Image: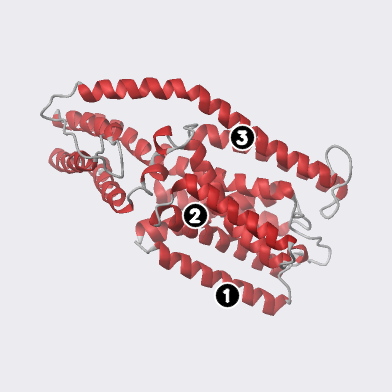
Amino acid sequence: MGYRGWLTKVPAITATFWVIKVLSTTVGETFADYLTVNVGLGPVVTDTMMITVLAVALVIQFRTRRYTPWIYWLCVVLVSIVGTQITDFLTDTLGVSLYVSTGVFAVVLAVVFLAWHRQEGTLAIASIDTPRREAFYWGAILTTFALGTAAGDLATEALSLGFRTGTIIFASLILLTWLARRAGAGLVLTFWIAYVLTRPLGASLGDLLTQSKDFGGLDLGASTTSLLFFGVILILVAREQFLANRHGVSRKGDGPLGGRRGDYTWAAAGAAVIAITGGLLGATQQNTTSTQAVEQIAITTSEPAATRQIHPTTRLGNLTRFSVITTDVQAKVARNDLAGGKTRVKDLEVSWDDAEAGLKPRDSAKWHQLDDEIDAVLTSLRSGSPSQADCAASLTALNKTLNQFDGV
């Protein structure tokens, strides 16, 4: 296919663009976690699947001759997933420091921009109208997601800022970038700075909505938050598709659906829906959370005195929920019910993954130690020929560490 008939392949940079970008970041991350942990595909299968789907989506995107909202934003969500997975692989699997990965991705992004500018003479977003320029564009987008993930994790985990503080910090940095643009800073520079910052902002915002109230979140859960965000994205992208079909990319038309005022209205409405719905759902979950807390206290206080130990408050806080599941799995393994233990340990995996954003920033070193011991338990129970002795040993070690780190 020739490219002389191409029109610009990216959307106009408007308020709805930024809202969709932030929301797609959260949806991409939670969906990948859902496939890896809840569905049980594991990181290798999930990574392979997402890379394959991204490759197919990019082929479709490159074969289009003009900006097509549905495939463009699908590619953004998939790039968000893959970019996050690249950083997570370096950090969690290879043990690369977040300081190192953040620096490396910053250098890679600079190299991409340098090569792009030397080849094309411009980094302008509105000039994505040839295959080579689009290739540079998506290469830069993928690198910004990897860099945003590393920088965001560095800020919220390694520097122990947490997702609540992270949301405020990254939102403030984006506001400063906007003010810099208003003061005369370059459009290209401010766009890419904001684009990098929206990745950790979206992740911090998602964690704020999904995490337990014990960690300062609204406790909506990953599924509810993802459905809420996906619904808003679907509506805004459908509007983009309608306007692109009718008016093209550069002009969105007038009336209730189009125009600058209409764009601000739709962007504000999308943000308001999330804020109001999140607040209402968070309030309705308060009673549920309180009831669960009472039940958890009852479970804890009903344990024999010999098995309960009270420790000074630690930075990780209350780990009772994980100890209860671990103890239950231990009981099944002690009866040589390894199949039952394998089924029950899934609850531990899901619960631990759900709490990562709240626990990890509190004490990254202790979190990683527990994470490794939980992985050892999962490996022993899920091996092809599980050994009762190996399972029992890994569970004993985990329960000992949970007891030691528990801040009850």
Q: Amino acid at mark 2?
A: Thr
Q: Is residue 381 above or below residue 61?
A: above
Residue bearing the label numbered 3: 275
For the residue labelled by badge 3, is the local secondary structure a helix, a strand or a loop? helix
Q: Position of residue 391 (x, y in %)?
A: 18, 40
Q: Amino acid at mark 3?
A: Ala
Residue density around tag 3, few if under 14, some if 14–19, many if 20 or more, within 10 Å: few
Residue occupying the point 53% across, 58% down: 148
Residue occupying the point 69% across, 58% down: 179
Residue bearing the label numbered 2: 84
Residue pushed farthest right? 254
> What's the CA distance linking mark 3 and mark 2?
25 Å
Tag nearer the camera, 3 or 2 = 3
Q: Is residue 338 above or below residue 150?
A: above
Residue bearing the label numbered 1: 111
For the residue labelled by badge 2, is the local secondary structure a helix, a strand or a loop? helix
Q: Earlier in the sequence, mark 3 or mark 1?
A: 1
Residue occupying the point 52% across, 62% down: 147
- Residue 354, image quadrant: top left
Q: Position of residue 280 (x, y in %)?
A: 57, 26
